[in-house]
Image (tube, rainbow, N blue to C red):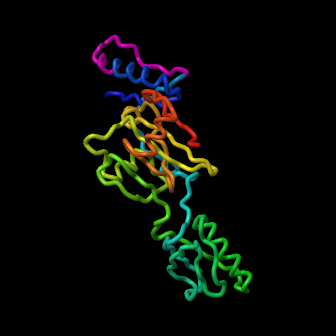
Amino acid sequence: MSIGFFLSVRVTAPRMRTICLALLGGAALAGCAHQQPMVSTDQLTVVQNSAGLPAPERHDLTAADRPSLIGPLDTIQVDVFNIPDLSREVQVDAGGQIAMPLIGTIDARGRTAQELAQAIERALRSRYVRNPDVTVNIKSSVSQVVTIDGQVTEPGLYPVTNQMTLLRAIASAKGLSEFAKQDDVVILRTVGGRKMAGLYNIDAIRRGNYADPAIYANDVVVVGDSPTRRRFRDIVSLAPLLAAPLIAVLN
């Protein structure tokens, strides 16, 4: 029975390429009867598993630190247990408000579904509804989007899920165009009121040199040339980006 080796890697980015090359070299010598078995080191942990790559556990399938937030023009479903007259599908208005019987308008913008449900429960309780039990679900979202521009097959606005990464965002835009520059991909993001940019190498991410970065709502992904991209190029001196992305604050 063949035994597969799977790696739980704890390694700094500059060492990743060296390890990958070493692993490839080891694979080429797999037929050698006297090959030394791969052992764990400070940089990586070897797991012997004949059944293949293990399936993810339930908590691996979600990203709890990236909740979906309600925004203007989103459509939500509000259900109030045992009070069907209050249960309804509601569209958030342009100002981030929804209107509910008994409580009037309530601010939904920037809240998770659970936070909005709790706010509705408090408002109903203040209107003498005993022990209200409210559930809110986001049915469709137009506010949680990422802009993908540049040398992709279908530039445009795409919905953001709590699992979205740079590679998945580009796949949503039907992939890179024929002449796209894989080492020239920028993520533009506002963090704490500051405009920031990260320069990434798609090919290096695909090879596993460094992690596929998370994408959040309101991010702008630019593949290849653009006026903003050119300004970023003027600010920093470019490196091959094979070991790590380049992050900068745009003043």
Q: Magenta span has 39?
A: yes
Residue, x 46% and y 45% (percent of image)?
228
Q: Position of residue 95 (x, y in %)?
A: 58, 73
Which residue is the extreme one toward the top? 34
Q: Position of residue 196 (x, y in %)?
A: 55, 44
Residue bounds of the magenta highlight:
27-42
Where on the picture, by quarter, is residue 200? top left
Residue, x 47% and y 66% (percent of image)?
141
Q: Point out the image quarter for the C terminus.
A: top right
Residue, x 49% and y 73% (percent of image)?
75
Q: Position of residue 121 (x, y in %)?
A: 67, 76
Q: Magenta span has 168?
A: no
| Camera-side residue of 6 and 238 | 238
| Camera-side residue of 250 and 190 | 250
The answer to whether 10 appears left or right of 30 in the picture is right
Q: Position of residue 25 (x, y in %)?
A: 34, 18
Predominant SS of the magenta segment: loop
Q: Is residue 121 above or below residue 48?
A: below
